[in-house]
């Protein structure tokens, strides 16, 4: 996605995705026959205990950039729980100046503090929500087609040292806040063939973190990624261009296009024997929502189209609800994008937010429908003993 346009337990045999810690550390994902991920050669004694995600994940995202009013974000977590989600994903950035930069940095004017992020994640636990932390890189001064997927630092060695510091910072937050899943990278297309680097990073994270580990690939190249054996969950940011030549396509046609992409996603998950999580799925309230969901930039004079947003969400649930609820499916779930803590919304709002728009009830009803299919109740599983 461009920087510029930037349950209670199931009563069936399908069990929750869980991490079982033994000595030495062995990570086991149970329930659907997914194979065990690679394990490090050594690890410290676990402190907070194993963590797990609900199965299915019915998630929703909060973007945490600079936070001027923390209570609004905490209230946003409450509203996400009330909508029927069982998981919160927090998406939060550090910045590099341009695509050739070697340094990734925390900018206090653009980024939240660690304490603010921990407060949001802890509020999720208080509300019975599982939590996913997905730190991302944003480009501070992008060119016309620049975004994190095309970074080419002058020195990869220097960039990876900086990325290690970036990872350590957010890993500390994840551990202190009891996060259930940590996403080690998002849409870093030009790094994905550097397997030795990713192996070193994931091994180090696994030695310090008892939760699930994921990587989030971009929608147009997840099938090319080969680092999936290193992580526990195969995540994809799902801004698929459905009926690309037909902005405003009818809902049944969007649903059929989704079904095609769904099968390709599930085939990839089966190939790598990893559960599939759609880490971002969302639509702007714009006429081209189905064709270019990654493009939220409305030129002057463009009118909001909240019905286009709702139509896309209805098509999504038509294509995915049965699969997500299926005990034998490789689909772990999805995280809707996004909740706006500042409550912008309504019929004139062109963004991804769903407050005051028809999409809100579509999503709430979609959550209810999936829970009904699996016989569960609203809420999330917590860490064992929690």
Image: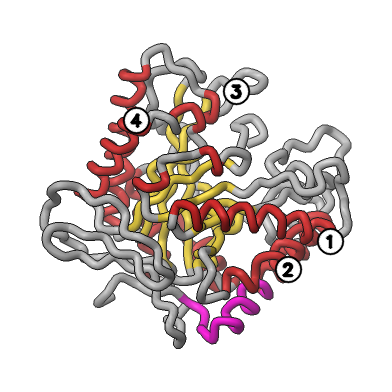
Q: Which residue is mark 2?
A: 318
The answer to whether the residue labelled 2 contacts the one labelled 4, judged by CB atoms less than 8 Å apart, is no
Q: Which residue is mark 3?
A: 146
User: Would you place residue 34 above or below residue 365 in this image?
Assistant: above
Q: Residue at position x 29%, y 32% from top?
A: 164
- The circle drawn on residue 251 is 1
Picture coordinates of residue 124 (x, y %)?
42, 65
The answer to whether the residue labelled 1 contacts the one labelled 3, judged by CB atoms less than 8 Å apart, is no
- The circle drawn on residue 163 is 4
Work out whether mark 3 precedes mark 4 in sequence or the reverse, and give the earlier one: 3
Kindly report the distance in space between the C-alpha atoms of the residues bearing marks 1 and 3: 32 Å
Query: What secondary structure predominates along the stretch shown in magenta?
Result: helix
Question: Is 362 in front, or is 30?
Answer: 30
Please state, as top left, top right, bottom left or bottom right, where the N terminus lies in the image: top right
Taking the magenta stretch, the answer to whether it contains residue 246 is no
Please state, as top left, top right, bottom left or bottom right, where the C terminus lies in the image: bottom left
Kindly report the distance in space between the C-alpha atoms of the residues bearing marks 1 and 2: 9 Å
Question: Which structural element holds mark 2?
Answer: helix
Visible in this render: residue 356?
no
Question: Is 331 in front, or is 46?
Answer: 331
Question: Is 383 in front, or is 374?
Answer: 374
Question: Which structural element holds mark 1?
Answer: helix
Kindly report the distance in space between the C-alpha atoms of the residues bearing marks 3 and 2: 34 Å
The answer to whether the residue labelled 1 contacts the one labelled 2, judged by CB atoms less than 8 Å apart, is yes
Q: Nearer the viewer, mark 1 or mark 4?
A: 1
Total number of numbered labels? 4
Picture coordinates of residue 87 (x, y %)?
47, 65
Bounds of the magenta span? 365-379
């Amino acid at each position: 996605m461009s920087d510029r346009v930037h349950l209670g337990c199931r009563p069936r045999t399908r069990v929750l995705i869980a991490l079982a810690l033994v000595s030495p550390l062995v990570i086991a994902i149970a329930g659907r026959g997914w194979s065990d991920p690679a394990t490090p050669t050594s690890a410290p004694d676990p402190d907070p205990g194993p963590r797990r995600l609900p199965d299915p994940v019915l998630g929703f995202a909060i973007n945490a950039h600079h936070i001027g009013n923390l209570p609004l974000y905490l209230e946003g977590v409450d509203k996400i729980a009330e909508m029927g989600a069982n998981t919160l994903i927090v998406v939060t950035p550090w910045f590099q100046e341009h695509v050739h930069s070697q340094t990734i940095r925390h900018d206090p004017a653009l980024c939240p503090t660690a304490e603010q992020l921990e407060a949001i994640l802890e509020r999720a636990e208080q509300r019975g929500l599982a939590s996913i932390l997905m730190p991302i890189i944003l480009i501070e001064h992008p060119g016309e087609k620049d975004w994190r997927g095309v970074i080419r630092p002058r020195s990869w060695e220097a960039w990876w040292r900086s990325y290690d510091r970036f990872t350590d910072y957010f890993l500390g937050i994840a551990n202190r806040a009891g996060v259930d899943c940590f996403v080690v990278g998002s849409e870093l297309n030009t790094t994905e063939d550097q397997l030795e680097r990713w192996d070193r990073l994931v091994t180090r994270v696994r030695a310090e973190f008892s939760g699930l580990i994921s990587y989030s690939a971009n929608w147009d190249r997840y099938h090319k990624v080969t680092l999936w054996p290193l992580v526990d969950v195969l995540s994809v940011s799902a801004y698929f261009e459905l009926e690309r030549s037909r902005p405003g396509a009818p809902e049944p046609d969007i649903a059929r296009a989704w079904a095609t992409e769904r099968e390709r996603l599930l085939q990839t998950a089966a190939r790598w024997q990893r559960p599939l999580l759609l880490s971002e799925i969302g639509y702007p309230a714009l006429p081209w929502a189905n064709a270019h969901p990654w493009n939220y930039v409305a030129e002057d004079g463009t009118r909001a189209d909240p019905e286009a947003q709702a139509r896309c969400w209805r098509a999504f649930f038509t294509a995915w609800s049965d699969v997500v609820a299926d005990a034998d499916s490789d689909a772990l779930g999805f995280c809707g994008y996004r909740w706006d803590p500042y409550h912008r919304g309504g019929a004139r709002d062109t963004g991804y937010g769903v407050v005051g728009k028809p999409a809100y009830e579509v999503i709430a009803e979609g959550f209810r429908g999936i829970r009904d299919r699996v016989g569960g109740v609203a809420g999330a599983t917590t860490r064992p003993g929690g």
